[in-house]
Amino acid sequence: MFKNKHLILAMLIAPVLAVIAYFGVDLAVSEKPHAAKEGETYKLVARSNCRYTSGLCDLENGDFEVQLRSESLTADSLVLTLSSKFPLQGAKIALVPDKSSSRQPENMNANNTDGTNWSITLPAPTTDSSQIRLVVSADGTLYFADTPATFIEYKTFFTEDQKDNS
């Protein structure tokens, strides 16, 4: 079928060169990971569970991860807990009615001596577009997040009738 040795050689070498080019370009232009520097500020990215009524909100930046959990929600109060893999020096949180609003953040209370578990009782959110703003400090570095407060209400897809039948 193929009698031209140059064409056969090109068909064998081209995929190898494509793979080498793919990894070479990635190595040349990708951002190099680096450790957090003391005194710097870094944004925490909200994972997908923050957008749904899951009761949990995971926030991360590289290896640094914190989790907000809605412990109880009543008509007038909200109890949130924060857990971290790393010891925190402090945590502040604010619940605002929408993205454009601002409110003075409140200090969260440490639940243990190693600084990995924190809690706070806040007023219940007043709108569906409420936002949570969080700032935590670890090893002299600040991490901040701004996420929807949708997750604070834990809902399942089951109705009460379906729960009783199972």
Image: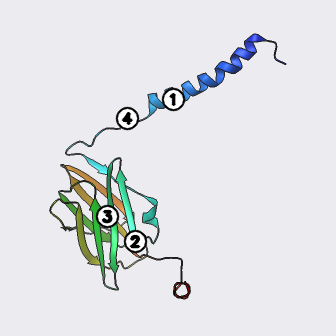
Tell me which label, 4 or 1, sits earlier in the chain: 1
Amino acid type assigned to the residue bearing label 4 in the image: Lys
Query: Residue 87 at x, y = what percent?
Result: 21, 55
Percent coordinates x, y for residue 137 in the rendering: 21, 55
Quarter of the image with the C terminus in it = bottom right
Residue 101: x, y in percent? Answer: 33, 68
SS at mark 2? loop
Question: Badge 2 is on which residue?
Answer: 55
Q: Nearer the viewer, mark 4 or mark 3?
A: 4
Disc with the residue nearer the chain's start (1 vs 3): 1
Residue at point 28% right, 53% down? 143
Q: Residue placed at 53% from the left, 80% from the top?
A: 158
Q: Which residue is mark 4?
A: 32
Label 3 sits on residue: 133
As helix, strand or loop, the secondary structure at mark 1 comes to: helix
Q: Nearer the viewer, mark 2 or mark 3?
A: 2
Comparing 34 with 106, the one in front is 34
Q: Quadrant of residue 7?
A: top right
**How many neighbours does mark 4 have within 10 angstroms: few (below 14), some (14-19), or many (20 or more)?**
few
Nearer to us: label 2 or label 4: 2
Q: In the rendered image of this protein, does residue 42 appear above or below residue 117? A: above
Q: CA distance from mark 4 to mark 1?
A: 14 Å
Residue 23 circle label: 1
